[in-house]
Every structure is written in C-alpha cells, then in structure tokens.
Amino acid sequence: MAGPLTWRDVSAPDFSASMQGIGQFSQMLGNALGGADKALTEWDDNKTDEVSKKFMLDLFSKYDTPEKFAAAQADGSLMEGMDTSRLNAPAMEFLFGRPNALLDTQGKQLDNRGQSLTNDSIALDTAIRTEESGWKRDDRGAIEAAKPYALSAS
C-alpha cells in the first residue's frame, strides 16, 4: 500500500499584480471617456452659443420695428428654420424681450421728436419775438423822427 498521508500547505497564486493592471486600465479608460464627454459637451455648448448669437443678430437686424416683429411672428417666419433646442437662455430672453425693447425704442424716438419739435418751436418763437421787438424799436424811432414833420405839416 501506499505510504502515509501527509498534509502540505498549498497556497493559491497571487493575482494582485494583474488586478492592479486591470484597475489602472479601467481608470485610464474612464479618464479617456470623461475627456471625450467633456470635449463633446464643449463642442455642443459652442454650437448652441453660435446658433443663439446668429439668431439674436438676425432678430436685431431684420425686425427693427414692432410692426415687422409682429408680422413675422404672425406668419411664422420669425422662427422659420430655427432649431429652438439650440437656443440658450440669453437668446430666449432676447426673443421674449424684443417686442418690449422695440416699443421702448419707438417711444423714445417719439419723445425725442417731440422734444425736438418743442425746441424748434421755442427757437422760432424767440426769433419772432426778437424780430417783433426790433420792428417796434425801429418803428418808434421812425415815429419820433417823423413827429416834427407831422407837426409842421399841420
């Protein structure tokens, strides 16, 4: 028969080094995917800003009166061809505030025209009064000069 049974310590292989390599790979892959995500997010944000700026410039240049803005809003040409998901918050605020801004500008222009007319009226009134006072002075001088002749003729 066989010899006596003995117990020997058998240890399992050490996989810690390979596990560290897998952990490092996982971390590097996560960093790479995070960098790609950041780059795509920045590109998307830049595209949104670009579209929003173009939209605001178009609104500012094409629709410079409340009437033009209202007409474009009514016929749908205001947002024609626009991907509204690409508009950022400032562009939306500009869009919603544009009618009020146009009305304010129009009101200020009317105020300025009214003030200009008032100033012109005051200047004209002053010029007329200056001329009238000059005529009155000239008439008085002529009347005083004519008095001796008028008295001698009578």
Image (tube, rainbow, N blue to C red):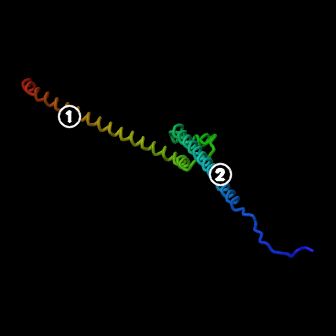
- Looking at the image, residue 11 sits to the left or right of residue 102; the answer is right
Give residue 60's position: percent from left, percent from top: 51, 40
Q: Nearer the viewer, mark 2 or mark 1?
A: 2
The numbered dot on residue 110 is none
Mark 2 residue type: Leu
Q: Quadrant of the N terminus?
A: bottom right
Q: In the figure, 134 relative to 30: above or below?
A: above
Task: Identify the residue under disc 1.
Answer: 133
Q: Nearest the camera: 88 or 139?
A: 88
Mark 1 residue type: Ser
At a point 26% along the width and 36% down the height, the residue shown is 126
Callout 1: few (<14), some (14-19), or many (20+) C-alpha neighbours within 10 Å? few
Q: Nearest the camera: 136 or 76?
A: 76
At a point 10% along the width and 28% down the height, the residue shown is 147
Count of numbered labels shown in the rendering = 2
What secondary structure is marked by label 2? helix
In the rendered image, which quarter is residue 55 located in? top right
At a point 48% along the width and 46% down the height, the residue shown is 101
Task: Identify the residue under disc 2.
Answer: 33
What secondary structure is marked by label 1? helix
- Looking at the image, residue 98 sits to the left or right of residue 23; the answer is left
- Distance from disc 2 to disc 1, alpha carbons, whole Å, reads 89 Å
In the rendered image, which quarter is residue 79 located in? top right
Q: In the figure, 128 relative to 103: above or below?
A: above
Callout 2: few (<14), some (14-19), or many (20+) C-alpha neighbours within 10 Å? few
Q: Nearest the camera: 8 or 105?
A: 8
Q: In the figure, 107 relative to 127: above or below?
A: below
Give residue 153's position: percent from left, percent from top: 8, 23
Give residue 11's position: percent from left, percent from top: 75, 68
